[in-house]
Structures are given as structure tokens and as C-alpha cells.
Amino acid sequence: MFSFIAQVNDKVSSKRAILIDLTIFPTRRVYYVIPVAKISIIDEYTHMNNPDIKEINVRNAVMADVSFIKECLIDSWVEHAKNNPDLMTEERMRRSKVDEYYANFIQKNKGYVFIADVNGTQVGLITAYKQKLADFFKDSDILYVDDVYVLKEYRRKGIAQLLLNKIESVARENMIKRIDARVYSYNQPMQNALLTFGFNQPYSTWVKIVE
């Protein structure tokens, strides 16, 4: 069985776009926009470029995934704390009850949590939920991407793109034209990835810690 990676056809109208809000602390929040385009599937991508990967599956998270979600997010948040000590601490991150939060999130269908499996093993996740913005926005109903995480040994294999494509599919199914997400300023690889996927930056928000 071959795995797939989706590419966006850049020959589309700019009239339909997805806005990605990348919260960048401690200095700024930047926004990236990508047109909502038709997705063309390239089969055999994973087979050709990653022969150790036979199958990739993106699925809904279940309660059995909660411990994996916690492990991934704590790892991600600790990295945030190390790079932004004025905003958070590693101790606080490790004490957070992320497992309880996501158990409740999944049980009560408060949003979307998708797991990426490679050869039947959990390797990544993405979380998102619906938000309502002020009516003066052109698209006030949005999907907010809260976390994207891929295990280090599985990065640069197209998995993050598959997870983001899944969120785009959810947006399409719910007639939502705008997706917001965030990434920290030190996370240059993710910023580069989004630019590679066709995103751009229309504006930014700057943050200052008041002593």
C-alpha cells in the first residue's frame, strides 16, 4: 500500500484563501495566507523517498491516544519554555494536566484531534477547534490550529503537511474559509515549511512583557 502527500495547485484564484495566524512570542504574531486550492495527490511519494515507511494514516484521536498526546505536547511545550523563559517555565509545563484536558476534549467532541500513524505507530498529531470572530471580519467562522507535532525522527517526511491537509479538509466540510494557527519565533523550520506550502504574511501583532 502506498502513502500519499498532497500538494496545492498554486494556479488558483486568490479570492478564496485560508488565513494561518502564527502567534510568535515574545515579540510578534504573524499571519500567513494560502489560497484554498484543489489538492493533487502524488502517490508513491513516501515509498520512493522514505522506503522504511510503508503506510501513513491520519485518523481521529481516541482515548487510547491521550498518553501519546501528552508526551508530544509536553515535549513541545518544554521547548517553548526553554526558548521563552520570560513567558513560561519548564516546571509549569511539566505540571500541566494536558492529559485531562485532551481526554475531556475528545470525549465531549470540543474540537478536532488527528493522529498520524506510520506503519501502525503514532508519530504525530494536530489539534484544532472552531472559533467565532467579530462580524466585521470577512470570514468570522474559523478553525484555530492549536498544536502540530511530529516525532523528531519522522520530520521532513511530509507528515506535517498531511496533518495540515486534514485540517483543510475539515474546513471545507464545514464551509469554513479561514484557518488560524500559531508558531513560536524560534521555530524557524515550521515557519519555513509554511512558506514552502504557499503561505504568506499579511500582518503581525507585537507583544511586550510589562515588568
Image (cartoon, grey):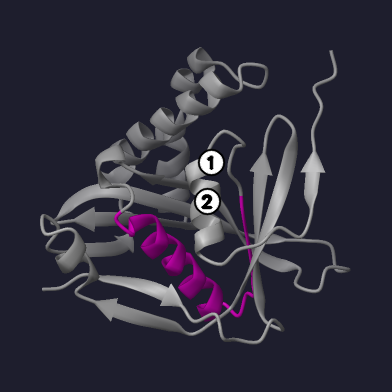
Decide if residue 130 is on the left or right side of residue 118: right
Residue 111 percent coordinates (x, y): 51, 57
Mark 2 to mark 1: distance in Å?
6 Å
Quarter of the image where the C terminus is located: top right
Residue 89 percent coordinates (x, y): 56, 16
Residue 165 vertical placement versus 145 (above, below): below
Circles 2 and 1: CB atoms closer than 8 Å: yes
Residue that appears at 46% across and 24% down: 78
Q: Main secondary structure of the magenta part?
A: helix
Residue 155 vertical placement versus 94 (above, below): below
Decide if residue 55 is on the left or right side of residue 64: left
Q: Residues within 10 Å of mark 2 (few under 14, many from 20)?
A: few
Residue 205 percent coordinates (x, y): 80, 44
Q: Please, what secondary structure does the residue beneath circle 2 have?
A: helix
Residue that appears at 44% across and 42% down: 102
Q: Is residue 110 visible to the viewer in this orientation of the structure? A: no
Decide if residue 210 is on the left or right side of residue 168: right
- Tell me the kind of residue under disc 2: Asn
- Tell me the kind of residue under disc 1: Gln
Residue 135 vertical placement versus 119 (above, below): below
Q: Please, what secondary structure does the residue beneath circle 1 have?
A: helix
Q: Which residues are magenta?
A: 157-181
What is the residue that sits farthest to the right in this orientation? 136
Residue identifier under label 1: 188
Residue identifier under label 2: 192
Residue that appears at 32% across and 54% down: 115
Residue 115 part of the magenta-drawn span: no
Residue 171 part of the magenta-drawn span: yes
Residue 159 sits in quarter: bottom left
Residue 60 sits in quarter: bottom left
Residue 107 percent coordinates (x, y): 41, 52
